[in-house]
Amino acid sequence: MPKLLLATNNRGKVREIQALLGGLGFELLTPADLGLALDVLEDRQTYAENAAKKALAFAHASGLTALGDDSGLEVDALAGAPGLHSHRFSPQPGATDADRRAYLLHRLQGKPRPWTARFRATVAIASPRGEVHYAVGECEGEIILEERGTNGFGYDPLFLIPSIGKTMAELSMDEKNRLSHRARAIQSARTVLMEVLFKR
């Protein structure tokens, strides 16, 4: 059975991707499954470049096809910030997800609402030979003042999808796998994944 390595140590991402790609005829592996300790610095200028850097690093280290992703929250009132820096959006080192959400609301104080925003994601599929394929997805919404929901991670409790009246953290896994930016990117990548893994 072909194997696909998920190029992330983020348990929340692993759960989402496993739910999206399970049952397609290939084996999904995590770095922990392989005893692979690899931390890739996300220092490039675009989501695609960061996703490819992670996927290539894990593919080369494991000898397996690897799937990496990079995503960010873009808030219009902050001129698109935090964007690429979403995972490091805090004035203090070692910040938690809760710290970053609090800092986001602090930065939005006094700015007119609604605080329209979107999540963007790029998925990169890399082979050990260095070939890379990409897919993208996005989800439109707005930032709200109070956190809602306990599912998800990151900025999910503050990101409202107005069309359904729920935050990303209030979605069931089935709903998230239809609506989220990462789900849309991975759904777009499925055809390429099947071609790469099964050499079609």
Image: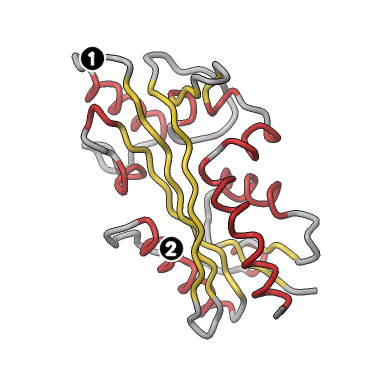
Q: Nearer the viewer, residue 195 or 16?
A: 195
Q: Distance between the residues labelled 1 and 2?
A: 39 Å
Who's the residue at 29% across and 14% down the image? 113
Check disc 1 and give the amino acid type: Pro
| Disc sitting over residue 200 in the figure | none
Mark nearer the viewer, 1 or 2: 1
Q: How crowded is mark 2: few (under 14 residues within 10 Å), some or many (20 or more)?
A: few
Colouring convention used in this rendered image of the protein: secondary structure
Q: How many labels were placed on the picture?
A: 2
| Disc sitting over residue 39 in the figure | 2
Element at label 1: loop
Q: Which of 82 and 40 is in front in this view?
A: 82
Q: Quadrant of residue 159?
A: top left
Q: Nearer the viewer, residue 164 or 150?
A: 164
Give left or right: position of 80 versus 162: left
N-terminal of the pair, mark 1 or mark 2, is: 2
Who's the residue at 57% across and 43% down the image? 12
The location of residue 1, given as percent across then percent down, is 80, 74
Check disc 2 and give the amino acid type: Asp
Q: In this view, does 110 lie above or below 56?
A: above
Element at label 2: loop
Q: How crowded is mark 1: few (under 14 residues within 10 Å), some or many (20 or more)?
A: few
Q: In this view, does 162 lie above or below 43?
A: above
The location of residue 34, given as percent across then percent down, is 64, 69
Give left or right: position of 53 versus 34: left
Of all residues shown, which one is farthest toward the bottom? 129
Give left or right: position of 61 versus 199: left
Give left or right: position of 111 versus 54: left
Residue that carries the numbered disc 1 in the rendered image = 112
Q: In this view, does 104 lie above or below 110?
A: below
